[in-house]
Image (cartoon, coloured by chain):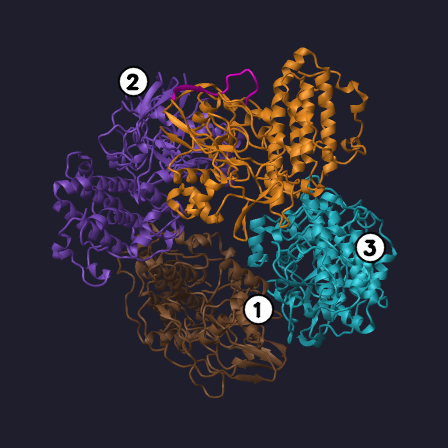
Chain colours: A purple, B orange, C brown, D cyan
């Protein structure tokens, strides 16, 4: 499909070198967060272009608290500079929507594909991931210009397309927007890391102070009968390919804890020698404990005999009733073993979650930090939001899974090895991005995501 | 349980320093392989002491072709010196049978626990795995003396124990003998690696030349209906804890290839650019291809435009009809994707294998190399023996799995992370060691085991 | 010595938190290079405060072409971000002049000592060198504010000090200004590296195009008789401690080439298999050639069968008559061996240079690139400026050398191991910074400095 | 020069495969050390063949205490297996004497050149140094057979050569014998390391107990006037190329300590925080202290609050009056700085040593350990033997130095970078191997040699 008329609008016609396009423009946004932008993003009946604008602007809103220097830094290979996230998500639309489908579209800069392709081997050669922090140019202003250039083209494409074209474009735009939302979360977890390694421990924004005092409700066991159950995406909304095909699994009876493990509970594990007792750990996990000298969750540090933790609002005392966060799979597994329990499988988790309303502490709360579980009656709490919950399930293809042809087929499938599934979203996830069948995945040693623990046991 | 009378036999009474025990003795065995030893080991009704002697002597028989220098070398961290295998398996009986259960038993040398404990954290401090090749003492003769010392004590313990004691000892001795059999296979795969890195490419023993000419039968699909099936160990014989609990899994209909993938078939994959096409590989696998410059299975090398491979009988031309061997999980997975198929899950494999007779090309054939599949009528071939078959299943606990208390609980459970399950045994496995529920496991990049490929597909 | 009156100026009185000081200020300088600034810096009779202002402003002038993002990046551990250079040189004056000598002075920010101490162990704990690129805050504006704060204090100190105090301050300020000049050169070599690793190959500034066409004069040998000669600093001007004591050395008769080796000459070495012939190389050098796959000087790359090189004016064809630049000691040594010559010792070099006028292609030319040697009659050319010249001399203490007590004693002495001496300054060196006795030093594998080759031979 | 008649002796005529040569032979030597062998090696008027036999047999005598397993291990990349030393020194004679000069000579095994060439790039491809411990074959017996084969050929060559041929062979044989003596010392330092990393701490041989009680004489300063002095080899005996050309150096007046620094003196440095005070160290040295957590000389370990050290006679309490040994250049330099002194330059050392008799504690004493300095009247003690003495001089070519053409030119010259000169020989050096002009060299972090400290100062 090539959509005609792209060249019809003289504003977008480009003559000479790509750089010429980037006319003087206001510096990167310093807008306050608007209340309506996120809700627009969640509106199911909004038009595609409205959704596009909402999600794209939400990305830029997240940048508002940053100094320009913050956009540039890559503090470890897993982290990408904010500047890179802004450009990569833009390249995604350019490469997978505009280039194949917008007739006459010319790429903003032919060098950007090399710089901003993340891992799509079939989309061409790309810059080394660990070297993203060495790239001072294009500047942040250039990158915002790149976004503007692509956004204009996307808006034109989406507003001028007929119904048939729109139907064809919708799956691509949807994956692009979901991709952008994933990077919104990564921008927050990455900038948290960047700021945390700075001896000055600068904050992303001031603390809201509304949460630390809250007292978590006591944990209960919520039992499930198991049996032959369906899991996986059933439609009709958007889902990633890794959530399909829907299929049956046999579950033995089990129970899940009613809420996430708290900092106070995790501190009991520490106090009981959790980080000194090899028998509680997977062998690879114990190797990490020894090699990295782990003594507490990531971002915790001791000051004057007390545990503090780095948050996006700066250093704060560890609040006992908040969910423990930034733990690895290894720590989650060791904690569960210490507690005489285990982690849920992803099928158990999904079976328990599918009946719950999608509500909780998401990025829209602008807390950027998990909060203590409130009272929620009989049912489970914190299933969605707050912290991603490690499952014991290795990230693997569902029965019958096939990757799509072409570069977009690399989105999920090729990572199905040596990673573990997390479920439920976090305080950095857009609420419109999550669903019961959603499978997030990270290597078992990863700690810089908002990852926590929900216990399970056999019944 | 402490068995009395250990000190009654003056031969085993030890006065002064442990070293005094090691009287002059004939050097390490150079016996020919006897036909009866292996069959004795498989006899189900033989007494425990007879089984003990058979398995232990089989270990030593495998050493017969070695030069003394061969026992010392550790050619990579995954490999252990033969000398270490001989001592570690002995330490296992000393630590888990003799010390707790033989009244008055004195350890052969108190320093050996540090040197020969592999990974049992609860059994005390231990030498660094990657440094096993730096240890010239105890000498090989010392280690054979250590075996003799422990074997005498074991024989006395087992022959003098009453029925009740024997019943109590049996599970420990059984795990010790199965452990020893695992190390018999590792001794072969490790010495193969040691000899292979030597530019002289020395052979472990002369070639038998009985197999390479054989023509493999064409592969067929063997279909299975799936449904709700039981897998896992059902008793009454020995099984490792990781094969339990027996439990139900839901299987969609599937088919398995009737035999393992051959070298000729794998060469088509190579010829079709298999090692150049990133889209065929898992992301971690492709990283290995690039970092290690993989171009063919491990042990293959090109000489004069032809593929040769290193075997325990030295360098040999790649025989087209033999099963491809020494491939990683990554290669098995990429090959399957290239072929439009997939790897079986371990549940599918077990369901298909449970009805098959345990027969095939095992270590007792003394080929130490897989052979082309013969004609076997309707059913599948090579299910047992020849090559371990990679499954797509991450090595994980079965529902309800609990590790035993104490150091022996570390045997399997703590390795359930970032490893993949292989099934069916190989040409280096003792036939009495394998069963349909047996779960072997290695990291996805491992290639120095006799590991091959059986294709699967949805039906 | 504590100089009173620091608090007298209300502009510099600081009440609350350090951050409060940094009032809104114009962004980093974008001034054109002024013709007078550098000449002021070289004026010998200017007052100390005038010298101070000239050198300090020259540092900021060098930043004018940079984008703000360029200040942040550390492209390899040897490179420091421009931002860090700006702050570190400021910390140097604060720590070694203001804190001990300006009564009532309060440090701009107590955290800066940790961030901006380079390697002075006796000046306290410091940030890891290789992590300087992870630090987004303080921002570039903060750092310029830090400079302004310290410059104001320095100006007040120097203008209000009496003659006796000034005499005492002069050595400290002089070392601080020479230190700043060293960092001016490092800023250029570091930003060259930062821009070079960017696939976009951005330029620091536009090319001047005045040099590449020039034809180098043929090289001649300039002979020296040798004998017992004095080398080392003889006063009265400033020199580093490593240039003393002045002492005698015995020199055999020798000759030096009249100019530096050119790119064309070096290309003959390449064409003759220079990078393939181990016998031309020091053993450690050959290991580098193999490990790093060196095939040409650093910053050279082949495009369309031709050699191009990255310069501060962007990619340019290698100009045959320019001095070869960015070669390691290993390459200089191998080239000399290939040419049947050797490198000079530093004593030979100094003996030959001491009679030459200090003139040449320095940073004040604003070429930031070496140029072909012009005609200079009988004498040697390019002794000063263009490229630092590797000598064969290991960097070692002169007989009788003693380091000063305290942190400033760490300036030079502790680096006298595994480094080699370079002489004469480069196109990035301020002319007022160089002298015949000046000893620069780098490890033998270093290539990111403007380092070249002058041949020597026995006569 | 091709010496005829090699094929005349039927014993050395070889028909088929090289391996056929190695007839059954008695295992590696277990002879007692003979009193006459070493003295024969030092006799200046003995015939070349007698010298050859004496040096070669001395190498084998050093092996007598070893278990066969000890020959195989490489405990770090700097260490070579004893087996490798035995073969490499043999390959040296085969390659540089027999192949070019013995008409009709056939190499023992064409594969050995690859395995046993150390670093002679011009002598062909070679095995990776760090992988020497992976090579179990050829066996130790094979290697002794290789020695016997080459020794027979060498004996025949040397006994049948006419005077003219002998004169031509002599320089090659001499360098081969000196090379062998260097490897005798390395065999001892390497096997010491191999045994030391074994948790059993096995001894090379029983302690002699004749030395530890001796009390060192107090250290005095021995003054020298300096001035213009000649250093370097003056003939007529053997010397390495790096000892030439003889040349003049200017020396300022200086003094050397009359003996080496003792363990007791070094312990004062430790007690005074020597390993905690960065200001005492070269920057690279301090980095090693921190990275390797150095707290004492290599081979020292604390047991029950006391310092013990590993020796070739096993673990022993540190004897206070023995010379401190196994210190790096960094430690020697830091100790000297702490003591308010410095290390000597190699020219100072040589000037002071040239008048001293070559006598002391060498390998012939069979102590393999330094002993406390006895009383020696006015002059210096321990100039020769006991411990190699670090000088402050970087290993560099003497003025006018040229390497020889061909592979033997790689013997010394290519290592003249980032190494420091040691002088005087050690308790592991053959007495006939040392001379005042002898230059040993190691990187500044090396500790596994018998290296110690002699202080110097300006006067």
Of the pair A317 and A15, the residue shown nearer to us:
A15
Q: Judge left or right: residue D43 versus residue C159.
A: right
Q: Position of residue B211 (x, y in %)?
A: 58, 36
Give above or below for D84 relative to B410. Answer: below
Q: Residue at x 39, y 42 (%)?
A: B280
> Which numbered mark, 2 or 1, is in the foreground of this view?
1
Q: Residue at x 49, y 60 (%)?
A: C293
Q: Residues within 10 Å of mark 2 (few under 14, many from 20)?
A: few
Residue behind mark 2:
A378
Give the chain letter at badge 2.
A
Q: Position of residue A420 (x, y in %)?
A: 40, 33
Let me know if residue B231 is in the magenta part: yes
Give the chain letter at badge 3.
D
SS of the residue at dot 3?
helix
Q: Residue at x 41, y 74 (%)?
A: C370
Which mark, residue C280? Answer: 1
Quadrant in which the C terminus of chain A is drawn: top left
Q: What is the distance, in whole Å, between disc 2 and disc 1 at their CAs?
A: 81 Å
Q: Position of residue B144 (x, y in %)?
A: 73, 33
Q: Which residues are magenta?
A: B226-240
Q: Residues within 10 Å of mark 3 (few under 14, many from 20)?
A: few
Give the chain letter at badge 1.
C
In this orientation, does residue B128 appear? Answer: no
**Labels 2 & 1 near each other (Cβ < 8 A):** no
Give above or below for B368 relative to D209. Answer: above
Give above or below for B128 relative to C275. Answer: above
Q: What is the distance, in whole Å, between disc 3 and disc 1 at their CAs?
A: 42 Å
> Which numbered mark, 3 or 1, is in the foreground of this view?
1
Classified by dominant secondary structure, the portion drawn in magenta counts as loop
Residue behind mark 3:
D365
Q: Residue at x 85, y 49 (%)?
A: D32
């Amino acid at each position: 499909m090539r959509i005609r008329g792209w060249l019809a609008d003289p504003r977008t016609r480009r003559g000479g070198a790509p750089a010429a396009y980037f006319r003087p423009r206001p510096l990167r946004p310093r807008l306050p967060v608007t209340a309506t932008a996120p809700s627009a993003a969640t509106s199911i009946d909004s038009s595609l272009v409205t959704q596009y604008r909402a999600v794209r602007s939400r990305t830029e809103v997240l940048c508002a608290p940053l100094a320009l220097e913050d956009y540039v830094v890559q503090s470890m290979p897993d982290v990408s500079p904010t500047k890179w996230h802004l450009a990569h998500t833009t390249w995604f639309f350019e490469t997978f929507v505009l280039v194949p489908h917008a007739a006459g579209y010319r790429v903003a800069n032919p060098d950007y594909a090399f710089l901003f392709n993340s891992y799509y081997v079939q989309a061409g050669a790309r810059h080394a991931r660990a070297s993203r922090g060495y790239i001072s140019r294009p500047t942040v202003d250039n990158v915002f210009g790149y976004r503007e250039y692509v956004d204009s083209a996307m808006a034109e494409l989406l507003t001028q397309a007929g119904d048939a074209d729109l139907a064809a474009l919708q799956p691509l735009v949807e994956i692009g927007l979901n991709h952008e939302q994933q990077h919104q979360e990564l921008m927050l977890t990455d900038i948290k890391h960047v700021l945390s390694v700075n001896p000055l421990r600068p904050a992303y924004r001031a603390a809201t102070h509304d949460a630390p005092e809250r007292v978590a409700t006591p944990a209960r066991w919520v039992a499930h009968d198991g049996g032959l159950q369906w899991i996986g995406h059933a439609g009709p909304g958007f889902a990633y390919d890794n959530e399909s095909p829907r299929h049956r699994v046999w579950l033995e009876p089990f129970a899940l804890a009613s809420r996430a493990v708290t900092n106070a509970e995790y501190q009991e594990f520490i106090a009981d020698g959790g980080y000194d007792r090899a028998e509680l750990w997977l062998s690879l996990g114990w190797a990490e404990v020894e090699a990295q000298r782990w003594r507490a969750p990531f971002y915790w540090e001791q000051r004057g005999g007390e545990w503090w933790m780095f948050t996006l609002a700066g250093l704060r005392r560890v609040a006992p009733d908040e969910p423990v966060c930034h733990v690895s799979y290894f720590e989650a597994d060791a904690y569960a073993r210490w507690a005489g329990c285990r982690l849920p499988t992803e099928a158990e988790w999904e079976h328990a979650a599918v009946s719950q309303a999608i509500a909780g502490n998401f990025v829209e709360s602008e807390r950027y930090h998990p909060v203590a579980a409130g009272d929620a009656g009989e049912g489970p709490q914190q299933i969605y939001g707050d912290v991603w919950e490690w499952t014991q399930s290795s990230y693997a293809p569902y029965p019958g899974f096939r990757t799509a042809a072409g570069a977009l087929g690399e989105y999920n499938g090729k990572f199905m090895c040596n990673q573990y599934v997390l479920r439920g979203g976090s305080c950095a996830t857009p609420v419109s991005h999550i669903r019961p069948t959603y499978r997030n995945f990270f290597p078992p040693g990863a700690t810089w995501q908002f990852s926590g623990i929900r216990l399970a046991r056999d019944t």
